[in-house]
Image (cartoon, helix red, strand yellow):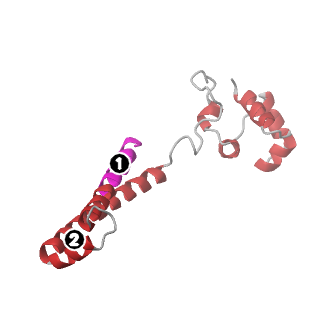
């Protein structure tokens, strides 16, 4: 499918007239008409605006062979995680892992250096697992959750 046909279909799908689309893109209605008739091609900055407006990729707009594309709305922000999301997962995973490890080290030091405090926390627990077990479980969950986030962010790269 050619760019002209894709523009026409996207515009019709959104229920816009050529004039309405032209207003949203900051161009003339005649320009939209020429694009849809195949007499002209939008400039690169206008193509980017079209891509962002309809939430489609530039590849979808520009490539004529779309046999591998089953849905015309590809490359959306929802379909492909942005680099920021991958970085955020990586940072969050690292913080969770390091936080869990630091908590385990602190708890180990408290248990060894101040056994009365460890016993007091263990005795104040309402759950049948003593306080030491709960804290250990929380630390391990933080470490595992962090590792999972790190692995997911690494696989998205």
Residue 106, numbered circle: 2
Tell me if mark 1 has few (under 14), some (14-19) or many (20+) residues whose alpha carbon lies within 10 angstroms of its own: some
Tell me if mark 2 has few (under 14), some (14-19) or many (20+) residues whose alpha carbon lies within 10 angstroms of its own: few
Secondary structure beneath dot 2 equals: helix
How far apart are the alpha carbons under marks 2 and 1?
23 Å
Q: Work out whether residue 62 can be spotted.
A: yes
Q: Residue lying furthest left in this view?
A: 112
Q: Quadrant of residue 58?
A: top right
Residue 30: percent from the left, percent from the top? 85, 39
103 relative to 28, above or below: below
Q: Quadrant of residue 131?
A: bottom left
In the rendered view, does 69 fall on the left or right side of 2?
left
- Residue at image position (87%, 43%) is 19
Please state the extent of the stretch shown in magenta in the rendering: 143-157
- Residue at image position (61%, 38%) is 57
Secondary structure beneath dot 1 equals: helix
Decide which of 49, 67 is in the foreground and name it.
67
Q: Which residue does the numbered mark 1 point to in the structure image?
A: 148
Q: Main secondary structure of the magenta part?
A: helix
């Amino acid at each position: 499918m050619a760019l002209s046909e894709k523009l026409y279909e996207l515009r019709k799908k959104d229920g816009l007239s050529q004039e309405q689309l032209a207003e949203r893109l900051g161009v003339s209605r005649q320009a939209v008409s020429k694009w849809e008739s195949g007499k002209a091609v939008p400039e690169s900055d206008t193509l980017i605006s079209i891509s962002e407006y309809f939430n489609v990729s530039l590849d979808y707009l520009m490539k004529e062979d779309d046999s591998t594309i089953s849905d015309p709305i590809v490359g959306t922000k929802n379909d492909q995680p942005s680099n920021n999301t991958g970085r955020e997962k990586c940072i969050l995973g690292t913080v969770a892992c390091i936080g869990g490890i630091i908590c385990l080290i602190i708890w180990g030091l408290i248990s060894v250096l101040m056994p009365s405090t460890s016993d007091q926390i263990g005795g104040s627990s309402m759950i049948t697992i003593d306080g030491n077990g709960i804290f250990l479980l929380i630390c391990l969950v933080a470490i595992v959750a962090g590792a999972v986030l790190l692995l997911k962010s690494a696989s998205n790269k």
